[in-house]
Image (cartoon, rainbow, N blue to C red):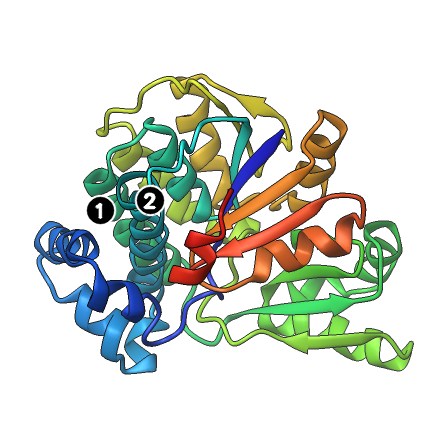
Amino acid sequence: MKALIFPGQGSQSVGMGSELYKKFDLVKKIFKEADEKLNYQLSKIILDGPESELKLTKNTQPAILTISYSILKLITEEFNFQIKKNIKYFAGHSLGEYSALVASGSLAFGDALVLLNQRGKYMQDAVPEGKGSMLAVMGLQIDELETYIQEIKKENGICEIANDNSYSQVILSGDTSAINEINKILKNNKKKSIFLPVSAPFHCSLMKPAAYKMEKEIHKVNFQDLSIQLVSNVTAKPTKSSDEIKKLLVEQIFSKVRWRESVEFMIKNDVKEFIEIGPGKVLSGLVKRISDKVLSKSINTIEEIKDLK
């Protein structure tokens, strides 16, 4: 069995999808639909930049969805790949869950674009610029990292696990003062950590104001129950219920992304191959770090689409 997985923020690059855009009218049509739905030239930002504009969360999130959706439509409509054949689960990393829901037929592309644009704005606005940070920690497992988190002084604020990506990569998020402190603690213990170039501290409790705003937006939109289960970031368990998905999308904004657990769950339930649909190769790389007993590949070029079986 296979799982379709969809990337999140950090997989973007200026010019992503340009090869597909130049060659296929279907992709041009999708880009045009995105521009019209959002009422600004997202397509120009995707294809030409500047990078500073693409990196703005309100642009990054709908941009990655647009590329993932374009690839999905090419696979199914131009190359006649039966996307749901032998697919047991859908999953996405953070905003990638919206791409997964569009792929599953639960959510319309246009609705997902608007929601992600709003999500990006609300997440960006939840914490004043410079007040929040994110830190990637390599080579430590969750339990070990938790002991270091306990050493942070309370007055320095929040430091929480934002992403459990693999056995060798965990992301921390929170107040800049707390993240700076744990970075020093880790360095003193000769542990490897790298600050992420992000504009806000995603997936921690500082994002709750954004979640409250998004709850209202999400409940305005029509979601369908899924025919193929989505493995949720929040629970690392599957669901088909549109009502449950709405609730989880709200919680996801301030909750840990349980990616490692999600992949392990799918492997334990007979998934032997993971196909990443969207820009970059981040998720297929993480799958390889989680398990060497399954196949994983990314699909974002014409050659990769042609090789898809």
Rendered image quadrant of residue 261:
top right
Near mark 2 (Cα within 10 A), the count class, few <14, some 14-19 or many ≥20, is few
- Residue for badge 2: 79
Q: Residue furthest right?
A: 189
3D distance between C-alphas at marks 2 and 1: 28 Å
Disc marking residue 114: 1
Q: Amino acid at mark 2?
A: Phe
Q: What type is the residue that disc 1 sits on? A: Val
Number of other residues with Cα within 10 Å of mark 1, as a class: few under 14, some 14 to 19, many 20 or more: some
Give the residue at x 40% y 47%. 209
Q: Tell me the quadrant of the picture where the N terminus can be found.
A: top right
Q: Position of residue 245 (x, y in %)?
A: 44, 26
In primary-sequence order, the first of circles 2 and 1 is: 2
Q: Secondary structure at mark 1?
A: helix
Instruction: Look at the numbered disc 2 and give the secondary structure of its residue.
Output: loop
User: Is residue 88 toward the left or the right of residue 45 in the image?
Assistant: right
Q: Looking at the image, can residue 160 be seen?
A: no
- Give coordinates of residue 159: x percent, y percent: 67, 59
| Vertical order, 251 against 55 (above or below) | above
